[in-house]
Image (cartoon, rainbow, N blue to C red):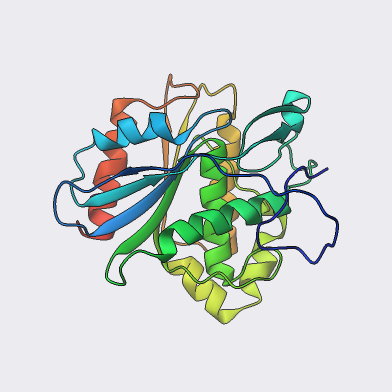
């Protein structure tokens, strides 16, 4: 069951109140503004905690935008409300994806990026559920449309997913292979996946499956980093890799 309501509309005339997104935190670039990246937090978190970490990174030419997800009932928590980019039950291939919630959050992120200057390189990153939303946005970019068919118009140049998973993995290959333009966009988009081997919240196998699903679907510019002894959290070594990857992929 989906608890979410897409801000773009879904063709449904049921009068469900859309969830309101929380506060957005912005980290301004300390040097010349060359890139803007929206960074998405995990389940139950908010944009503030990540903005503090991102501000400490040696990436002076990046502007970071850290939104806060809406507070909504979440199935995996027994319907308990907390900040979440979409509804999620168990992490398994049999569990249906909340495409309405995913589309709504992907559109919210795209709106945040749509007002950036034309010469600025745009990217999306995230942790856990935020990583899942970033990867879903990558698939929308490749297809040129959201799951509900509305056009996706933001030109993405980098995607980062830490300790996350890929929603909609089962049908992705057919959607990408069916369009020459989608295959071209998928092949050119740089994506960094990173996962701790001892993650008990989003097990490492979900990161591996995401990598393989993206690769099979035609995403060719992929990197997958595994960290031994690391659980469901980030460590300085991992963030160093993120910095190096962004510098090389975005030419900063």
Measuring from the top left, give residue 129's x and y in whole percent: 57, 38
Residue 159 seen in this snapshot: no
Q: Is residue 73 above or below residue 140?
A: above
From this viewpoint, which residue is outermost toward the top?
229
| Of the pair 133 and 160, the residue shown nearer to us | 133
**Horizontal placement of 41 versus 64: left or right?**
right
- Residue 52 placed where, x, y %? 32, 31
Residue lying farthest to the left in this orientation: 31
Between 40 and 183, the one nearer to me in the picture: 40
Q: Is residue 218 left or right of residue 149?
A: left
Please tell me in which quadrant of the rendered image residue 172 appears: bottom right
| Residue at the far right in the pictured view | 14
Please indicate whether residue 186 sits to the left or right of residue 77 in the image.
left
The picture quadrant where one finds residue 89 is top right
Locate residue 230, reporting x and y percent.
Answer: 44, 21
Residue 179 visible? The answer is: yes
Q: Position of residue 164 (x, y in %)?
A: 54, 38
Quadrant in the picture for the C terminus: bottom left
Residue at left 28%, top 50%? 63
Count up the numbered dots.
0
- In the image, residue 95 sits, relative to residue 134, either above or below, namely above
- Which residue occupies the extreme bottom position in the image? 180
- Is 70 placed above or below 38 here? above
Q: Quadrant of the N terminus?
A: top right
In this rendered view, identify the residue nearer to me: 170 or 250: 250
At x 15% / y 56%, what residue is drawn?
32
User: Residue at the location (63% across, 54% down)?
Assistant: 104
Image position of 235 (left or right of 148): left
């Amino acid at each position: 069951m989906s608890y979410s309501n897409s801000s773009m509309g879904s063709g449904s005339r049921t009068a469900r109140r859309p969830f309101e997104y929380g506060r957005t935190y912005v980290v301004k670039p300390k040097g010349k503004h060359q890139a803007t990246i929206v960074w998405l937090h995990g389940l139950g978190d908010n944009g503030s905690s990540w903005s503090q970490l991102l501000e400490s990174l040696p990436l002076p030419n990046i502007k970071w935008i850290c939104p806060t997800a809406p507070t909504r009932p979440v199935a995996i928590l027994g319907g308990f409300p907390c900040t979440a980019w979409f509804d999620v039950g168990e992490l398994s291939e049999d569990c249906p994806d909340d495409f309405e919630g995913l589309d709504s959050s992907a559109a919210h992120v795209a709106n945040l990026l749509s007002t950036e200057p034309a010469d600025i390189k745009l990217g999306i990153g995230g942790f856990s559920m935020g990583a899942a939303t970033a990867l879903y946005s990558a698939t929308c970019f490749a297809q040129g449309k959201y799951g509900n068919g509305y056009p996706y118009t933001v030109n993405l140049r980098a995607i980062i997913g830490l300790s996350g998973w890929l929603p909609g993995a089962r049908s992705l290959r057919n959607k990408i292979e069916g369009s020459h333009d989608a295959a071209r966009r998928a092949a050119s988009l740089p994506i960094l996946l990173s996962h701790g081997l001892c993650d008990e919240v989003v097990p490492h196998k979900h990161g591996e499956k995401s990598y393989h699903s993206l690769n099979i679907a035609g995403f060719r510019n992929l990197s997958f980093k595994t960290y031994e002894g690391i659980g469901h959290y980030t460590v300085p070594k991992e963030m160093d890799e993120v910095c190096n990857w962004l510098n090389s992929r975005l030419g900063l």
